[in-house]
Image (spheres, grey):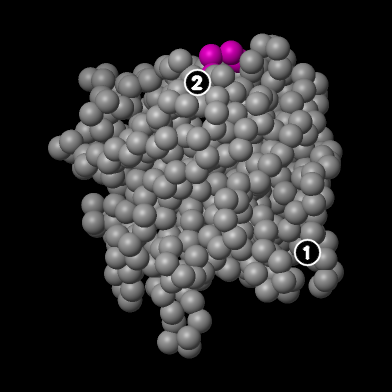
Amino acid sequence: MIRLKLLLTVLLLTPWLLEAQKVKSFNGIDASQLSAPPLDIDPNGAVGTKQYLEWVNNYYQGYDKVTFAPVWSAVQNGATPFLENNMPNCKIAGDGLVMFDRMALRWIIAGHTGLVGGKYYYCVAISNTDDLAATNFSWYTYQFLLNPAIGVNSGGRVYYPDWPKLGTWPDAYYVSMDLEDPSNNYLEIGVVVCALDRANMLIGSTANPMQCFSDPSPIPHNGTLYLSHSLIPADVDGPTAPPQGRDEFLVSIQNPPHDGHTTKSNSINLWEFHVDWINPANSTLAKSSLSMPTYTPGCYNLSNIFYTFCVPQPSFEKSGVHYHIDSVGDRLMPRLAYRNFGTYESFLGSQTVRVGTGGNKQTAIRWFELRGSGVPTVFQTGTVNPDTLAFRFMPSIAQDRVGNAAVGYSVSDGFKIHPGIRASWWNLSHNTAPTEVSIAIGRGDEENSMKYGDYTSMTVDPVDGCTFWYVNEFFPTNQTGGAITWNTKITEFKLSTCH
């Protein structure tokens, strides 16, 4: 069945972008299509050569890029590729991802499992073709035992490998994970980053063992609060790969010191991962710091920095306060989008920051661009905040082949804006002001949970290098009691200056 299309035409007022922009949106997976829909769905996806592939916990569906027709007659269970290859341990427990390897033109599904006989696994499925609808379509699947890499606490309990994020790079797939202590309210105590053997995984051969590094190192048995968590690996866009031998880079937030009064930070962390598959002893992970304009992480809470539930919705609880949802403002957001322009290399990232003052907790989107042929440095930053009322949060950013940036995000406020979806775009080279468009107007609030997904994804069409594709969630009606009613929207748009 052809999915419902919504066509919006937006006239950009920026002088050098005079042509009207067409924003096409269609409905993705919604809760009614699932037998047991979850509350926290982490909507994400990627655009490939022929289809768009969407993920919500823990299901996926592909859509034709032209007709928007679904690839499969029903939404697929996330465990399907692994069960088909006799890997019953690989039931992704949440935080799943779908990606498109633009250098190899292959699809990726990845995520961690729950505890299986006291063990955690990281599971990755790689497609054998770029065409989800091909008659010979199949998956190469891999399960990597995480226990040796993630450590145990003083009671012998394995640390929980939370919020894994994956980046495609020529020499490896790089995955980062937070380490959380299940005996201490899942306190963040460190991070682990692993390189996966991309070369062998792409051809279905036996993969070399993961190469992993932690911070702190060694992993402590009695971990304390860790403020540099949730690393985002660089992920390649465009037809030009990084220069041969180029190390992978990752970024993470540097939260303010947890001292009871400091709310601001002026840096992020840069991590350089050098992998050597021939001699693993030569592999390294190095951490450095990048100075940034001062910021307060979105919904920063002095007493509990991981309690980031300050985004208001119009509806009220019985106590008379607004229902609130999570900004996930304590970390940077995926992706760290890498593009090699030949004359320079660019890395784009984004996060949610507080822009309100005093008692106003309003959040907005902070973006940054790193450049450099060696260790990249901050080239420019900016903030997307067109008004003084709406909360903008949970962004994902990318750029097209001519340097136009686009960021998608959620939006809500405590007056009349139910949680919805918007995007903004601008030109990085000309430093133009962002232009915002509404993608999906929410018609209801989430009243039965404060969790509102943990991330979204903006990707760029690998065929034309111009068309942005974005996925996020919204509510058609108030979600109350035991009801689960979320919808997702998939959107594509291209700027007139990209041909």
* Looking at the image, residue 451 lies above or below residue 318: above
Q: Which residue lies at the image location 82% right of the left edge and 66% below the top edge?
A: 262
Name the main secondary structure of what is drawn in magenta: loop
Give the class, few, some or many, for how many residues have Cα within 10 Å of label 1's Cα (few <14, many ≥20): some
- Give whichever of discs 2 and 1 has the lower sequence position: 1
Q: Let me know if residue 73 is in the magenta part.
A: no
Q: Is 168 in front, or is 309? A: 309
Viewport quadrant of the C terminus: top left
Looking at the rendered structure, the kind of residue marked 1 is: Thr
Residue 441 lies, in percent from the top left, at 36, 54
The secondary structure type at the circle numbered 2 is loop
* Looking at the image, residue 477 lies above or below residue 232: below
Does residue 378 appear in the picture of this structure? yes
Does residue 397 appear in the picture of this structure? no
Q: Nearer the viewer, mark 2 or mark 1?
A: 2
Q: Which residue lies at the image location 74% right of the left edge and 64% below the top edge?
A: 154
Residue 234 lies, in percent from the top left, at 64, 31
- Residue at numbered disc 2: 497
- Residue at numbered disc 1: 263
Q: Which residues are magenta?
A: 237-241
Give the class, few, some or many, for how many residues have Cα within 10 Å of label 2's Cα (few <14, many ≥20): some
The secondary structure type at the circle numbered 1 is loop
Q: Which residue lies at the image location 50% right of the left edge and 48% below the top edge?
A: 409
Extreme residue toward the bottom, this view: 319
- Disc number placed over residue 166 in the picture, else none: none
Q: Is 9 in front, or is 488? A: 9
In this rendering, would 29 be left or right of 191?
left
Q: From mark 2 to mark 1, how far is it between C-alphas?
A: 40 Å
In this rendering, would 404 be left or right of 106?
right
